[in-house]
Amino acid sequence: MRVLVVEDDAEMAQEIATGLRQAHISVDIAYDGEEGLERALLNSYDVVVLDRDLPRLHGDDLCAQLVGAQSHTRILMVTAAGTNEDVVGGLQLGADDYLAKPFDFAVLLARIGALARRSQPAHPPLLREGDLVVDTARRVAYRDGRQLNLTHKEFGVLELLLAVKGRPVPAEELLERVWDEAADPFTNAVKITISRLRTKLGDPPVIHTVARSGYRI
């Protein structure tokens, strides 16, 4: 999952990002509306956590422009103003959910998870391919009944490859979906992660390289 946090309060933005990363979510941050819009249109995010009162471009306008661009990204609008009128106004602009400050982080995390499930085609909580099983809710994977000790990136790659049901996934897509903006687009991180994942999965091999197309299970 990849999330964009658009929040002009740098301390709050970093706190949210740190919490989300601890929950194994890739996070980018924008500190004003114009930067947020640019990032949201440039990258593929599952969810944008959008502060409503932003400098340079108001959160309402950012939300309206994302909706007008027919973005599939889900928008969670966050603001200190939590009256019924504010909630209704935010949802009428096209936001998918609304959360008033101050909020409990567990609630924020649950809302993001619910929105992320709506941003992508639904897939069952258990993904299977032969003796390989991935529990997406508990974030654990098994092969032939043996639990695999996977890193966050390894699990994300495996989950995505299983979810697309045999479609080859280019390295660029894996980098975009599993990593965040800190990843160098010219890095060999995907290749290294695939190699380590193959080792942990063991034989017979389940991840195959498709020439000029990427990787698939």
Image (spheres, helix red, strand yellow):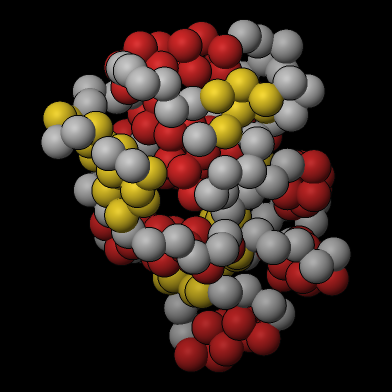
**Residue 86, percent across and down?**
56, 83
Residue at point 65%, 10% (across, down): 187
Q: In this view, does 16 lie to the left or right of 46?
A: left
Q: In which quarter of the image is residue 150?
A: top left
- Is 53 rendered above or below residue 24? below
Residue at point 37%, 32% (across, down): 155
Q: Is residue 186 left or right of residue 142?
A: right
- Is 68 rendered above or below residue 217? below
**Residue 161, percent across and down?**
51, 38
Q: Is residue 108 left or right of residue 71?
A: left
- Is 122 rendered above or below residue 181? below
Q: In which quarter of the image is residue 158?
A: top left
The number of numbered discs placed on residues in the rendered structure image is 0
Q: Nearer the viewer, residue 42 or 19?
A: 42
Q: Which of 77 and 171 is in front in this view?
A: 171
Q: Which of 55 and 117 is in front in this view?
A: 117
**Residue 7, percent across and down?**
58, 48
- Is 2 rendered above or below residue 120? above
Let me know if residue 172 appears in the view: no
**Residue 162, percent across and down?**
46, 43
Q: Nearer the viewer, residue 135 or 205?
A: 205
Let me know if residue 130 appears in the view: yes
